[in-house]
């Protein structure tokens, strides 16, 4: 996801140009990218406010978890913090970061709060965001974030809701590519409160360093993730022991939360890892097994089943077809790709 592709439905320069008018553009520009008084504002979906980079935790040679913090004035503190903390239980959501020199904005999906050993959340008296960002070349925004020094300032606005999470969701299959794991972790965090929910995460990474320590999966080998439809013979994949990626550690923490303290692969939250450089790729047969049509639903089992696809454009296009721009907004578009060929009559597909 590049994860930054999780865009909120807001105007873009191209969309505004279609409507024309210098006055309209000027109003939008001031609303969207004005630098004035960002330091005095607090977290807001319409206006940028200032966050401070507190720490940078490397995940791989090209990616890291960035922790951002914003102090909340005393008169607003209780309400703001309560609303912020509760949001992780209710929605999938993103924030937009501004690159001030180029005046461009990019959306990123925050990771869920860290869990203590007892499964509780690390709260604080200020708003804290954690973003999983990979440095791309070229990539103006990601490079800008990676160059930021500790205690440096970022202009950010949000939250922007993507999808409501509630107890009607019974089963989730989440296909994640690269940093597209961030919304999968948000969903796992929010859905863990519902005891009847089940979730399977299939995470595809280009290199093992991104998911170091994550247990492998038995999958067909292939030259690329675009070449999975041939029925290759399945072989086991050897995983070398070593330090775990911070993302893998957090995924295992979520798994224990779901599975009553156990990280067993057979629990309510199942996680599989796939690594391009090891010749392992998400296979359509595995997706079919996880999303197989249900028997006629019983009165006690009629919840929603949702299949998410999140990651770089090529990953999403391959599995579910491209999203489309219409009336200045990014929309789902029709279902295409591999998933369009499968029998998913019980499932809603959502592209992130």
Image (spheres, rainbow, N blue to C red):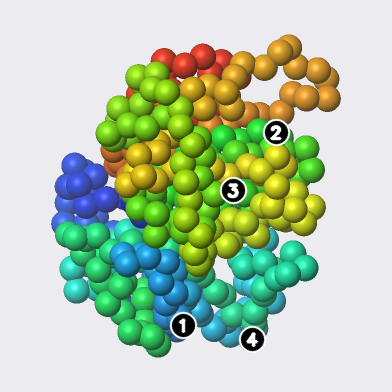
Q: Which of marks 4 and 1 is in front?
A: 1
Q: Is mark 3 on a helix, strand or loop?
A: helix
Is residue 295 found left or right of 92 in the rendered image? right
Which residue is labeled 2 in the image?
170
First in residue order: circle 2 vs circle 1: 1
Residue 310 in view of the camera: no
Report how far apart the C-alphas of labels 2 and 1 lie in the structure: 37 Å
First of labels 3, 4 by sequence position: 4
> Which SS class for mark 4?
helix
Quote the CA–CA distance across marks 4 and 1: 21 Å
Lower position in the chain sequence, tag 2 or tag 4: 4
For image coordinates 50% across by 67% down, the residue present is: 243
Residue 74 numbered tag? 4
Callouts 4 and 1 close, C-beta under 8 Å:
no
Nearer-the-camera pick, 74 or 315 = 315
Kindly identify which residue carries mark 3. 187
């Amino acid at each position: 996801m590049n994860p930054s592709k999780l865009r909120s439905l807001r105007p873009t320069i191209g969309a505004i140009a279609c409507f024309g008018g210098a006055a309209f553009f000027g109003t939008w520009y001031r609303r969207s990218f004005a630098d004035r008084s960002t330091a005095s504002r607090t977290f807001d979906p319409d206006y940028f406010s200032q966050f401070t980079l507190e720490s940078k935790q490397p995940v791989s040679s090209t990616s890291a978890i960035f922790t951002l913090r914003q102090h909340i004035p005393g008169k607003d503190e209780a309400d703001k913090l309560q609303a912020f903390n509760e949001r992780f239980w209710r929605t999938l959501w993103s924030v937009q970061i501004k690159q001030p020199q180029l005046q461009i904005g990019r959306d990123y999906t925050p990771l869920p709060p860290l869990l203590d050993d007892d499964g509780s959340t690390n709260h604080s008296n200020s708003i804290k965001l954690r973003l999983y960002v990979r440095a791309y070349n070229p990539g103006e925004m990601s490079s800008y974030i990676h160059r930021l020094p500790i205690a440096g300032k970022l202009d950010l606005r949000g939250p922007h809701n993507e999808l409501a999470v509630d107890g009607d969701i019974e089963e989730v299959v989440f296909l994640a590519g690269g940093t597209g794991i961030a919304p999968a972790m948000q969903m796992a965090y929010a859905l863990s409160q519902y005891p009847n929910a089940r979730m399977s995460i299939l995470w595809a990474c280009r290199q093992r360093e991104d998911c170091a320590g994550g247990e492998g999966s038995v999958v067909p080998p292939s030259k690329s993730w675009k070449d999975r439809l041939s029925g290759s013979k399945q072989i086991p994949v050897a995983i070398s022991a070593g330090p775990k990626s911070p993302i893998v550690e957090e995924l295992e923490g979520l798994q224990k939360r779901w599975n009553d303290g156990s990280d067993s692969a057979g629990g309510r939250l199942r996680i599989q890892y796939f690594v391009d450089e090891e010749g392992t790729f998400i296979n359509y047969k595995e997706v079919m097994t996880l999303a197989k049509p249900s028997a006629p639903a019983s009165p006690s089992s009629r919840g929603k089943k949702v299949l998410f696809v999140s990651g770089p454009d090529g990953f999403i296009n391959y599995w579910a077809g491209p999203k489309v721009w219409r009336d200045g907004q990014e929309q789902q578009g029709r279902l295409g790709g591999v998933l369009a060929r499968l029998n998913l009559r019980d499932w809603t597909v959502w592209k992130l």
